[in-house]
Amino acid sequence: MALEMRTFGDPVLKSRAAPVEGFDGSLALLAEQMFETMHEHEGVGLAANQVGRLKRIFVAEVDDRRLVVVNPVIEEVSEETATAEEGCLSIPGVRVEVERPVAVVLTGQDLDGAPLRIEAEGLLARVVQHETDHLNGILILDRVDRETRRAALRQLRERMLGR
């Protein structure tokens, strides 16, 4: 069952998610529901607070690789950065250029609580950074300059008003 997508303006999106402590069937069910919601909205990643759950878990699917990361921590980032256009399922219709490291090392846990270590580059690195940002209450509009943010908010307002 797909979950309700929370959109820009919902305070849960600006809230820091709490660490997951219980690794049981309810966590696996949440992950499956998150994948279903992500696919329904044609996304490549989804953080739990985007569906109203303040738990540190995200799902992603990049290049046919399904990923569930619980309690993610970005341990290392490359010095090299790249700017690319990003969208967000919680800010529909808005795309902005975001600069991010091109490679990261991410640690966390899987659905059973076992340790995970992921070395990611390219699109996967961008996605895991974007989703980890969500779990810290950070949106893509927090990663751009004021002028870009204003233009994006104007675009979002016009979209919501149906113009």
Image (tube, rainbow, N blue to C red):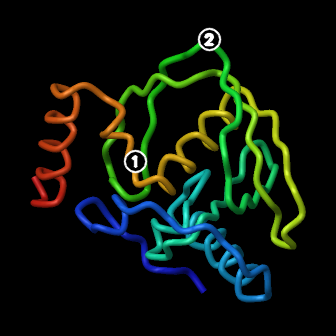
Observer-nearest residue: 111 or 38? 111
Quadrant into which the N terminus falls? bottom right
Q: Is residue 141 above or below residue 85?
A: below
Query: In the figure, residue 154 lies in which quadrant?
Result: top left
Q: Secondary structure at mark 1?
A: loop
> At x 38% / y 58%, what residue is drawn?
90
Q: x and y percent of residue 124 in the render?
A: 70, 37
Q: Secondary structure at mark 2?
A: loop
Q: Is residue 116 above or below residue 95?
A: below
Amino acid bearing label 1: Ile
Picture disc at residue 138: 1
Binning the other alpha carbons within 10 Å of mark 2 as few (below 14), some (14 to 19) or many (20 upward) gives few
Query: In the figure, residue 162 lies in which quadrant?
Result: bottom left
Q: x and y percent of residue 16 in the render?
A: 44, 60
Observer-nearest residue: 33 or 63? 33
- How many numbered discs sit on the rendered protein? 2
> At x 67% / y 46%, what residue is drawn?
73
Q: Earlier in the sequence, mark 2 or mark 1?
A: 2
Picture disc at residue 80: 2
Along the horizontal axis of the image, is 31 left or right of 7? Answer: right
Q: x and y percent of residue 135 in the render?
A: 51, 57
Observer-nearest residue: 145 or 95? 145
Cα separation between marks 2 and 1:
21 Å
